[in-house]
Image (cartoon, rainbow, N blue to C red):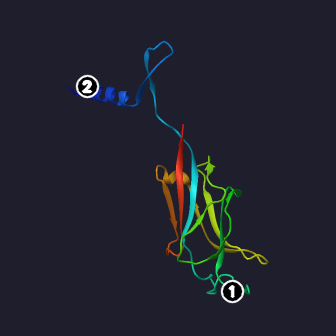
């Protein structure tokens, strides 16, 4: 009895993993249709929230004579190699969502390798200020359409739109 049940379940499992198709002669054949993850496509980048002040408590761009708000851009890298850089959004307010559209979508084929996402305030004359960063592995978010990255104090929140690539 147990063997019959196990045999039936095994057969059922095998049949659900197969699909029918007709060959060149019109004969039905069965092939396995298991899809394998081969990459991720980043389709959108949004900064939902970022700190209103630098780590020393001053406003972003406090030394710029005509600019007091952050001029944000986003970069991503893997193994210290750049894989993405956004456009710069001027005069960003900390509690307003900022959507980046340039250089999208882009593919990440090394989806099991850490990605470093950094947000910068562009300063022009001096070095750009690091607003914050995240390190994540895309594969840890497989099958999700949105990857949400948030700092421990929720002062920095970034959302990435993702499409998963399967063969």
Q: Is residue 21 left or right of residue 108?
A: left
Badge 2 local density, few (<14 within 10 Å), some, or many (20+)?
few
Which comes sooner in the sequence, label 2 or label 1?
Answer: 2
Q: Which mark is residue 62?
A: 1
Q: Give the number of marks.
A: 2
Q: Which residue is label 2 attached to?
A: 3
Using the image as rendered, state which of residue 23 and residue 9 is in the foreground: 23
Of all residues, the one furthest to the left in this rendering is 1
Instruction: State yes or no: discs 2 and 1 in contact (Cβ < 8 Å).
Output: no
Q: Is residue 79 left or right of residue 31?
A: right
- Residue at point 64% right, 66% down? 118
Badge 1 local density, few (<14 within 10 Å), some, or many (20+)?
some
Classify 78 as above or below 18.
below
Residue 11 placement (x, y as % from top left): 33, 26
Of all residues, the one furthest to the top in this rendering is 25
- Residue at point 46% right, 34% down? 34
Which quarter shows the C terminus? Answer: top right
Residue 58 placement (x, y as % from top left): 64, 87
Q: Nearer the viewer, mark 2 or mark 1?
A: 1
Label 2 residue SS: helix
Using the image as rendered, state which of residue 119 and residue 11 is in the foreground: 119
- Residue at point 72% right, 74% down? 128
Residue 115 placement (x, y as % from top left): 61, 57
Using the image as rendered, state which of residue 124 and residue 156 is in the foreground: 124
Label 1 residue SS: loop
- Residue at point 46% right, 25% down? 31
Q: Which mark is residue 88?
A: none
Residue 144 placement (x, y as % from top left): 46, 53
Q: Gap between marks 2 and 1, in whole Å? A: 76 Å
Classify 16 as above or below 153.
above
């Amino acid at each position: 009895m147990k063997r019959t049940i196990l045999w039936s379940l095994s057969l059922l499992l095998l049949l659900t993993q197969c699909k029918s198709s007709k060959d060149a002669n019109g004969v039905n054949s069965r092939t396995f249709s298991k899809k394998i993850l081969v990459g991720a496509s980043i389709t959108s980048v949004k900064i939902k929230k970022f700190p209103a002040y630098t780590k020393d408590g001053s406003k972003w761009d406090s030394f710029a004579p005509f600019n007091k708000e952050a001029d944000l851009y986003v970069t991503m890298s893997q193994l210290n190699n750049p894989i993405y850089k956004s456009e710069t959004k001027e005069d960003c307010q900390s509690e307003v969502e900022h959507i980046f559209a340039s250089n999208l979508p882009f593919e990440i084929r090394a989806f099991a390798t850490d990605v470093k996402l950094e947000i910068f305030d562009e300063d022009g004359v001096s070095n750009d200020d690091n607003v914050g960063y995240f390190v994540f592995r895309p594969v840890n978010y497989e099958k999700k359409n949105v990857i949400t990255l948030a700092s421990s104090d929720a002062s920095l929140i970034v959302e990435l739109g993702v499409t998963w690539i399967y063969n």
